[in-house]
Image: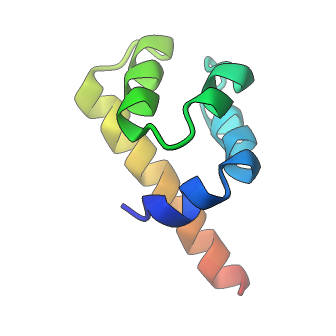
Amino acid sequence: MPWKPINARWSDYAEAFVARFPETDAKTVARLQGDLIGLREYLAIAHDLTLSEAAEAVDAWAANLVTKRSEAA
């Protein structure tokens, strides 16, 4: 997963995360910068997912962001 570039600009991407996963809270997501495991755990709780489902959702979201960024460049 392309986590490093996302983490480096987390303040830009946190809003997009909340938009994609509306049951999450912006302040909580912002505090989870650099904590991929915590982000997955939080998403699982907020959206009533298993940890595996949350991990897949976060990975797919991140891959989509990096793909869009690459296409725009």
At a point 67% along the width and 32% down the height, the residue shown is 30
Q: How is the image coloured?
A: rainbow
As drawn, 41 above or below 39: above
Query: In this view, which residue lies farthest toward the bottom?
Result: 73
| Left or right of residue 72: residue 23 | left
**Residue at coordinates 66% horizontally, 24% vertically from top-left?**
22
Residue at the extreme left of the image, as rendered: 52
Near-viewer residue (64 or 29): 29
Q: Is residue 46 above or below residue 67?
A: above
Image coordinates for residue 27, horizontal then vertical, percent = 72, 22
Q: Give the residue displayed 37% in from the left and 23% down from the top.
A: 41
Q: Relative to 22, is 55 above or below?
A: below
Quarter residue 45 falls in = top left
The answer to which quarter of the image holds residue 24 is top right
Residue 8, compared with residue 42, is above or below; it is below
Q: In this view, does 73 lie to the left or right of 65?
A: right
Q: Where is residue 40 in the image (x, y as percent from the top left)?
A: 39, 31
Quarter of the image where the C terminus is located:
bottom right
Residue occupying image coordinates x 75% and y 52% = 12
- The image shows residue 56 at horizontal and vertical percentages of 33, 42
